[in-house]
Image (spheres, helix red, strand yellow):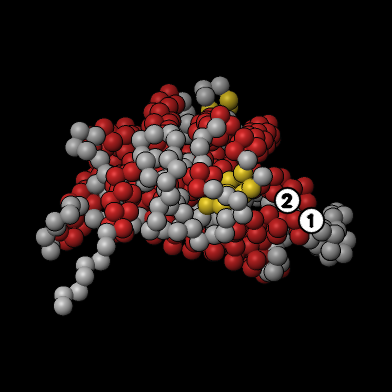
């Protein structure tokens, strides 16, 4: 058995556009930069789709839906089901390799920070700490992690997410599959927004699915925490926004997509999440800046077309924001926007976040190199809490501070590397003549950017459903040329094959 290696330079087959089976002709203008195992033929490089491979792709699409409906998959039973599905993907992946006599492996560099995080967690489980060095009188843990049980749970979650991410890089490999996964996300996001709005209008915000009563949080849709629903909407709304701002939609499609965008945006605003509103505004601004050439894209553009396109995108953004604000005001009234400036009855407009961050900074100072352990903030928080110490905080409400708290400088470097690689490689993937591919890459980057902004105020990526969709969008943004349409690939190949003109004598 051999190994097929796909990377950022791998080029798609010649006639994969619109079909679910790639062809067997390799491109000549983008050679493989990764070594291929000896004996690997051209047919094995381009691959054919087996039943196992199709089931893996189907599992990815279904997981987007089921992990969200299961309260965001934050409960143990939901995490167990998610882990079983990841194990099923591994089995199907191996069976696919057995049928094709070679295993597909991607060397997309975004996988390395995730592998580094897993390695960090394993190191934190080593018994390298003296029994009394943790400063917790009741703790008998000798591991570097102050809460080894929580660290193990985080490792299981990260391993499962990495499996899904790696499978997305391999099995979303044709234009048809790219369209299928994107439509799945968009349609489900729209339906989820409708469900969330209906539940918001028919309950007092303390019930999920109308039957589960909450006592310590405000729900929205299937999420126990309304901020997590807002984070999910930031990801789903990004794809139709990317297609719209990139000019990838036909005229008859734009009204439908704008209605979908409006529904998702209004649902996000109705969560009353300040972080979500700020992230949505940042997402739209991101698209205005980088989405070009946009709606005026053509082969024969006048010199002033980039300026006109930028003005058109800015006008579209202002109209979109006005429509979202107006829709939210009509549905929820003026109180929808009260938290954006702080609730008058609250002593602290940030709902205690500034204190949470100050305590987390003390933890970072105490454990600067490898952190206190993945998922251990709930154990160490009370020791550094300057208040009465009775509050047990599970999350720091700032993913960046918690990354440094749980993983130290090592974890911070891994997180920074992931972000840099994501936007560097995603920006390169936008340079294509395939409008749909460019729109998908732009929208996926915008969604990831919005969640990264929201992570300054909340912990949406600690929810399994949000983290899974974030990584799927990262895969769509950085996927190689196999997902481009055939017409654009043929045109680029013909240009590369055309002989150079002979010099005049």
- Whether residue 146 appears in this view of the structure is no
Q: Which mark is residue 151?
A: 2
Q: Position of residue 8 (x, y in %)?
A: 47, 56
> Which residue in the structure is indicated by mark 1?
125
Q: Which mark is residue 479?
A: none
Query: Do callouts 1 and 2 mark residues in contact (Cβ within 8 Å)?
Result: yes
**Residue sitting at 56 percent across and 52 percent down?**
5
Count of residue discs: 2
In the image, residue 249 above or below residue 494: above
Q: Secondary structure at mark 2?
A: helix
**Residue sitting at 46 percent across and 54 percent down?**
10
Q: Which residue occupies the foreground of this view, 276 or 111?
A: 111
In the image, is 374 to the left or to the right of 293? right
Q: Which residue occupies the foreground of this view, 442 or 275?
A: 442
Q: Position of residue 245 (x, y in %)?
A: 27, 48
Q: Position of residue 270 (x, y in %)?
A: 39, 38
- Whether residue 468 appears in this view of the structure is yes
Q: Residue furthest bottom?
A: 505
Image quarter (top left, top right, bottom left or bottom right) of the N terminus:
top right
In the image, is 343 to the left or to the right of 39? left
Q: Which residue occupies the foreground of this view, 21 or 289?
A: 21
Which of pointers 1 and 2 lies earlier in the amino acid sequence?
Answer: 1
**Residue sitting at 59 percent across and 66 percent down?**
413
């Amino acid at each position: 058995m051999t190994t097929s290696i796909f990377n950022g330079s791998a080029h798609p087959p010649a006639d994969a556009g619109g079909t679910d089976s790639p062809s067997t002709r390799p491109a000549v203008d983008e050679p493989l930069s990764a070594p291929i195992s000896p004996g690997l033929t051209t047919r094995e490089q381009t691959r054919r789709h087996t039943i196992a491979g199709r089931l893996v792709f189907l599992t990815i699409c279904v997981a987007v839906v089921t992990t969200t409906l299961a309260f965001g998959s934050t409960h143990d039973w939901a995490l167990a089901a998610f882990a079983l599905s990841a194990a099923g993907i591994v089995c199907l992946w191996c069976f696919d390799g057995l049928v094709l006599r070679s295993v597909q492996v991607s060397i997309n560099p975004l996988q390395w920070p995730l592998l580094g995080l897993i390695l960090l967690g394993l190191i934190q489980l080593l018994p390298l700490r003296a029994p009394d060095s943790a400063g917790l009188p009741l703790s008998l843990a000798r591991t570097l992690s102050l809460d080894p049980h929580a660290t193990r749970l985080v490792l299981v979650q990260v391993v499962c997410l990495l499996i899904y991410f790696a499978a997305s890089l391999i099995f979303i490999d044709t234009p048809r599959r790219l369209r299928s996964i994107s439509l799945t996300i968009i349609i489900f996001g729209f339906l989820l927004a409708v469900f969330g709005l209906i539940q918001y209008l028919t309950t007092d915000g303390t019930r999920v699915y109308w039957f589960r009563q909450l006592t310590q949080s405000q729900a929205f849709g299937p999420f126990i925490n309304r901020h997590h629903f807002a984070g999910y909407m930031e990801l789903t709304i990004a794809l139709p926004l990317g297609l719209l701002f990139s000019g990838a939609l036909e005229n008859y499609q734009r009204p439908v997509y704008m209605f979908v965008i409006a529904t998702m945006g209004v649902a996000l605003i109705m969560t009353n999440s300040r972080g979500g509103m700020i992230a949505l505004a940042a997402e739209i601004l991101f698209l205005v800046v980088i989405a070009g050439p946009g709606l005026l894209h053509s082969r024969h553009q006048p010199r002033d077309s980039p300026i006109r396109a930028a003005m058109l995108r800015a006008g579209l953004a202002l109209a979109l924001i006005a429509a979202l604000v107006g829709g939210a005001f009509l549905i929820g009234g003026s109180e929808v926007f009260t938290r954006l400036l702080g609730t008058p009855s609250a002593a602290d407009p940030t709902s205690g976040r500034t204190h949470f961050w100050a305590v987390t900074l003390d933890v970072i100072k105490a454990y600067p190199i490898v952190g206190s352990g993945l998922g251990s903030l709930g154990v160490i928080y009370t020791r550094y809490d300057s208040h009465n110490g009775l509050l047990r905080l599970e999350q720091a409400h700032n993913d960046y501070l918690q990354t440094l708290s749980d993983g130290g400088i090592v974890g911070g470097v891994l997180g920074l590397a992931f972000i840099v690689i994501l936007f560097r490689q995603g920006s390169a993937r936008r340079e294509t003549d395939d409008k749909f591919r460019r729109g998908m890459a732009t929208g996926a980057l915008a969604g990831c950017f919005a969640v990264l902004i929201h992570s300054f105020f909340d912990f949406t990526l600690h929810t399994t459903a949000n983290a899974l969709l974030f990584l799927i969008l990262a895969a769509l943004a950085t996927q190689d040329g196999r997902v481009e349409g055939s017409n654009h690939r043929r045109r680029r190949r013909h240009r590369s094959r055309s002989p150079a003109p002979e010099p005049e004598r």
